[in-house]
Amino acid sequence: MAKIRDVEAKYAYRLLVELDNGNVIYLNMTEKLETVRFHDLKNENIFNDVETDGYSLYWDFGRISMSLSEIYEMTKIKSTEEKKNNAI
């Protein structure tokens, strides 16, 4: 399984996640900010201070985190929804 090489906060609550296998994921976090778990990331200072240990993303010294498998799941769901919408 790939590991996270780097992560960079972008405008409008997006993350650029670079994997060690050369793939790049552009992750839109806006929907997640409406959940209790990620609500504090609405504070741009906290959001922009994202870090990685190679296996997950974390903010606020690890108080908020998201695993690589969760990131994959977010992108998988998005891809499936887009395919459904394009089929209609």
Image (cartoon, rainbow, N blue to C red):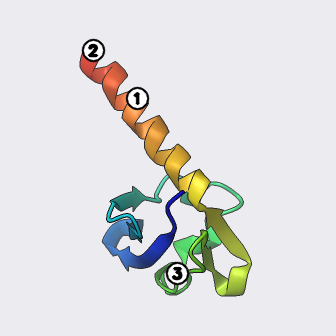
Mark closer to the chain start, 3 or 1: 3
- Kindly identify the residue that appears in the image at 27 percent across and 14 percent down: 87
The foreground one among 1 and 77 is 1
Helix, strand, or loop for circle 1? helix
| C-beta proximity under 8 Å, tags 3 and 2 | no
- Check if mark 3's residue and mark 1's residue have beta carbons within 8 Å: no
**How many neighbours does mark 3 have within 10 angstroms: few (below 14), some (14-19), or many (20 or more)?**
many
Residue type beneath disc 3: Val
The earlier-in-sequence mark between 1 and 2 is 1
How far is the residue under mark 3 from the one under mark 2? 36 Å
Q: Which residue is mark 2?
A: 87
Q: Position of residue 44 (x, y in %)?
A: 48, 80
Q: Residue at x 60, y 53 (%)?
A: 69
> Which quadrant of the structure image shows residue 41?
bottom right
Q: Position of residue 23 (x, y in %)?
A: 33, 60
Gap between marks 1 and 2, in whole Å? 10 Å
* The N terminus - image quarter: bottom right
* Three-letter amino acid code at the position of disc 1: Glu
Give the residue pinned by disc 1.
Answer: 81
For label 3, the SS is loop
The residue type indicated by label 2 comes to Ala
| Disc nearer the start of the sequence (3/2) | 3
Check the image and report above or below for 13 versus 51.
above
- Where, by quadrant of the figure, is residue 81 drawn? top left
Nearest the eye: 82 or 18: 18
- Check disc 3 and report the residue beneath it: 50
Residue 64 pos. (x, y %): 69, 72
The residue sitting at 32% across, 73% down in the picture is 11
